[in-house]
Image: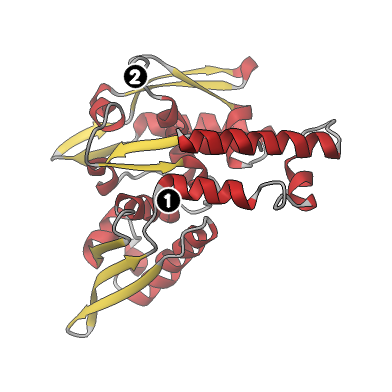
Amino acid sequence: MGLLVTARKVKVSNDLVRCAQKLRLSEKRLLMLVVTKVTSDNIDSEIPVTAIEYAEFYNVDRKSCYQTMVAAHKKLWSRDFVMDGKLRRWVITCEYQHGEGCVSIRIHPDMKEHVVDLKECYTQYYLRRAGEFKLIYSWRLFEQLMRCRTTGKFRISLADFKVIHEVPASYSRDFSQVRHKVINPAMKEIRASGLPVKLTTFKKGRAVDMLEFTFPQEQQRDWVKALAKNGGKQGITKKYIEKHAKPGESYSEAQERLQRELDNQQKAANE
């Protein structure tokens, strides 16, 4: 996959990040791709996402990608969440172009204030950072961390953590199970994305009551620059080139294209 797509940013309100969103991984992936395309000019229009675009961005199989997108969109149509005491929905229209392998989504008008023209109290991150997540828990926690990226510290009660992350009741009473099945797997994927997060727990009596996640303070463009540096001419490995080469491309052609995309990506990070 070309690295230029790294520059796609997700920008959503903190209120939206804090609420329990009830989304599964495929739904989150589709919705966030749409969010990166939303502007004040097209918020009231249907926004297309192609199967090729989805497959390349998330590094998934193209053959089954379209059906995954359609299933995710059907779920998005019925998904709701509560914010400010009101029941809200994500989307209001849907359209499928089977021959073109494309779905089109129109964001619900209630979402406008949470995804466009945000000047303060918002969470922002490069979508590519979450592109390799296999667990929805990872994505939810990552967004919480990005909300606090300038302080490097995210503190939350265990009770609120369970609500936001929709921890199953089957093991929510046992913190060791929550840690083993939710927190540790999520932190492992987040670390693999380049953010070395650590967890400290605090007890009230004998039970864990508070969670504190700490990580190095950073600016979003710092991550992009580091990625570009690590993937520059001296860092692009043969394995990397073989993985991201397009069908029919020679080794040198792939190397030249990837370097060009890295240069464009670094330019976008500096804008």
- Please state the total of marks drawn on the protein image: 2
Kind of residue at disc 2? Ile
Kind of residue at disc 1? Trp
Residue 23's image quarter? Answer: top left
**Where 179 sits versus 41, above or below?**
below
Q: Residue at x 53, y 32 (%)?
A: 69
Q: Earlier in the sequence, mark 1 or mark 2?
A: 2
Tell me residue 72's x, y (percent): 48, 34
**Residue under pointer 1:** 139
Neighbourhood count class around disc 2 (C-alpha, 10 Å): few under 14, some 14–19, many 20 upward: some
**Where 111 sits versus 123, above or below?**
above
Q: Secondary structure at mark 2?
A: loop
Residue placed farthest to the left in the image?
85
Specify the label residue 43 is tagged with. 2
Closer to us: 75 or 161: 161
Q: From this viewpoint, is residue 113 visible?
A: yes
Asked which colour scheme the image uses, the reply is secondary structure
Q: Secondary structure at mark 1?
A: helix
**Where 109 sits versus 183, above or below?**
above
Spatial CA distance of label 1 from label 2 is 24 Å
Closer to us: 78 or 117: 117
